[in-house]
Amino acid sequence: MQKIKRLLTFGFTLIMILVVVAACAQTAGENPTSEIPTSEVPAGEMPTNEVPTNEVPTSEIPAESTTITMAGSTTIQPLAEKFAEAYMTDHTNVRIDVQGGGSSVGVKAAGEQTANIGMASREVKESELTEFPGINVFTVARDGIAIIGDPNLSVDNLTIEQIKGIFGGTITNWKEVGGEDANIIVVSREEGSGTRAAFEEMVLGEEVLITETAILQPSNGSIRTTISTTPNSIGYLSFGYLDDSIKPVSVEGVAPTEANASNGTYPIVRPLNLITFGEPTGELKAFVDYMLSEAGQAIVVAEGYLAVK
Amino acid sequence: MSGRMIADKTVKYVLFVNAILSIVIVLAIAFFIFRESIQAWTEIGFSDIVFKSVWRPGQDQYGILAMIVGSVAVTFGAIVLGVPLAIGSAIFLGEIAPKGVQSLLRPAVQLLGGIPSVVYGLFGMVVLVPLLRRINVPGNSGYGLLAASIVLAVMILPTITSVAEDAIRAVPDSYRSGSLALGATRWQTITQVVIPAGKSGIVAAIILGVGRALGETMAMIMVIGNSVIFPQPLTANPLTLFLSQARTLTGNIAVEISYATGVHESALFATGVVLFALIIIVNVSARWLINRQSAITTTRQG
Amino acid sequence: MINENLEPMLHNNSATLRSNLKVRSASQNFWFSIMWLAGLITLVVLLLVLGYVIVQGGKAVNWEFLTTAPRGGLSGEGGISTTLGTTVYLVIITLLIATPLGVGAAIYLIEYAGEQGLTSPIMRVLISITNFAVETLAGIPSIIFGLFGYALFVSTLRFGWSLLSASLAGACLVLPTVIRTTEEALLTVPDDYRRGSLALGATKWQTLYKVVLPAGLPGIITGIILSVGRIISETAVFFVTLGGSHRLPTSIMEGGRTLALHLYYLAMDTNAFDKAMGTGAVLVILIILINLTINIISSKLTAKVRGG
């Protein structure tokens, strides 16, 4: 009896191991480029590349077989992966590594030349320009930030003043802004997030700070999940992440749509910036030009962002 | 022959190096975490970090007092909820349960300790948080101290139960027979003789549980809400304190480390230093109690 | 382990004494039922968590889920194959580092430390500090190992977010487990074995290698399997040392995502709770298997020691 039990367990374990090995073998065998995710989740803000493994000291890259490292904003990351995927199919001698880390890390990585291209989903601050005088900033796309609530939210429209009140903690009940009698639950991104910085800069201004009682979530995805499952909650989210699980709220009577954002009526739009150290040259310049070309901007639109041209 | 002896000596020295590697690692951990935090201590200052509760890296404010309170509060909650259950289970396993039940419950406790913390976190997010949200208190989001304490109580249960059970089992059987022979009931024997004799071991078990609770990270991020506030009651009823959101020291590190640069990053390492110090104090006192326990039981046994 | 060996003997002894004393007050019945309740609640909690995760997660688990790669995306498309692969890589590399170091340390502490301590007071102090260090290491929370790995391996040594950084940090994490279980295993090997071998003219190392280690092997294997479990369930350390790419690493310098990390990302970044639960179910089943294996080995071990 004991023996049979033991045998069964070992058999089962063996099978599990075989499954694992088979799975690995299969995926390893597949063509790696086809696996580049179409819209990768902003990898939980993971790999900051303050310390990239593929370090390229200057913006100049030799023509034959080159690696371009991008690091920074997790909002831009999925878009950058699309750029990389498209560019690499035409330029087989180039390998583009896209890593996250957040906007601040993006500026720093470009400034310290630990990445060839930094990504920042907000304006580059004065302080950063002073710290890294050599950096060169260009806007590759623009992105709207939507104010979102749970799917059954009783409010459809908010003014900028009301939004300030809610996120600043002076308005705490939905009835104060024309909704049901229910407490407002504020959900926000972490300090350091480019989306948060852009939201603070464009909506809250200098004097209003996000209330301390806000639930803080570490990524766009978890903001969306929290709001979709928490009644009476409100937060803000990049346009690219909008879906049916949450309810977008109009701002000053303007719905958060791409049309309204590109014609300038929707007020909360931020630039998605790429940063290089000095003027890009060689293969790096070719890649940058590609992103700003018609083909590159078509990708921007396909991913749900606003083209810059 | 002499070749064998040389091999013998070499092996001894290699093994010795292996043995002291643990010392090296502990020192290296302390060194590197402290080294990375120096910038924060010098630029922000010790008291502005440890005694201030406003954490706004954007405004250069790096007070972690709210998170220290958050860690302590959630640990307290977990102890209140988890300790009676854990000690009860330990007494049950050590003194009361029939053999068959023991052989079922002991692996169960072991398994409970093996379940990954993200699985507990997920369970908390999907099952517990929506359930707690039904408590009708204004401002209650479900995320918060209570959800975190419950998850944590389950997570520290195996640690406390197994160490406490060891302590109870280490009490010499002559104590029990003596007590029973004097006419005490089994329950009286347990409360008057066994538990007092195993007291330091049981207390050590609880302290080890505290250490485990202070150190838990991922499950906490998933259910506690991560707000940087002093936990405070949501209404006039002080019990609603436990529905308040909070942030733990561990959560602060894990949530922000990948964003942080410069002083901000250094401040997160400073958070790590505070956590490290707390844990060392907790664990050293637990070890001291366990050693005292084994000293007591062996001398008495002899 | 020692406790378990002695326990039945002691128990029979007192059980007869106890059953002779049929003194049962109402209070005792009350408290005993409370204790039964405590045991029962513990069991129910376990079954609740396991049952929920396996039943809910089981719906998402099928052959395809296990064998396709995650495709990323906000809806968490795809399966878990690459994360299983990364987990296997990480377990293997971590154990390749931790096992020799941990087993070696344990051998020294059990087999050599005693005689060294007798000859030199400095060694005695060093050995007690070592024991203290192992205890300390066992109590340090995993996020601290993560921070350490981040500061030393990722930043200072410039290994970046990679399998190498993660497995080095992971090795520090499981080292005390390997040391402690190996020590216990070596302690159960009867001294007669050592004396017999030495008397036959073997050197100390030959004795250890040919006699003591084989005799303690099941216990050492238990420790290794226990470490496998820790690595599989660990998240915080790898969250800050392994990166988070869901592609399978092709070298030791590349990062990746383990099963547990994947579960975290799915739960926090996507709406795919079903996939997160599915990943949870796979994790939990792996842990159950590991615990079963450990129990089988240690019951075999106890049987052998009793027989010998």
Image: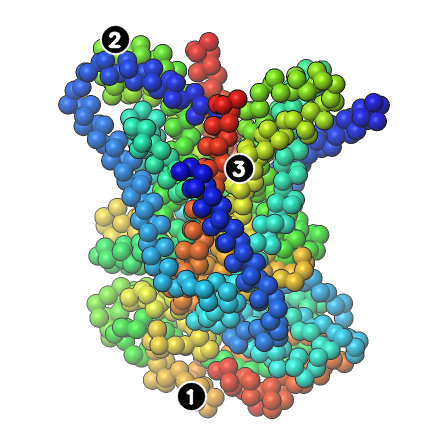
Q: Is residue C40 left or right of residue B41?
A: left
Chain where mark 1 sits: A
Q: Which residue is mark 1?
A: A260
* Percent coordinates x, y for residue B233 in the rendering: 29, 50
Residue named by callout 3: C222
Q: CA distance from mark 2 to mark 1?
A: 88 Å
Quarter where residue B135 is shown: bottom left
- Crowd around label 3: few <14 · some 14–19 · many ≥20 (10 Å): many
Q: Residues at badges 1 and 3 in contact (C-beta under 8 Å)?
A: no
Question: Closer to the camera, B239 or C206?
Answer: C206
Q: Is residue A114 left or right of residue B172?
A: right
Q: Secondary structure at mark 1?
A: helix
Q: Please identify the quarter of the rendering in which residue A185 is found.
A: bottom left
- The picture quadrant where one finds residue C243 is bottom right
Q: Chain of mark 2?
A: B
Left or right position of A37 against B240:
right
Whether label 2 touches label 1, CB < 8 Å: no
Camera-side residue of B8 and B67: B8
Q: Which residue is mark 2?
A: B182
- Name the residue at 40% across, 38% down: A1
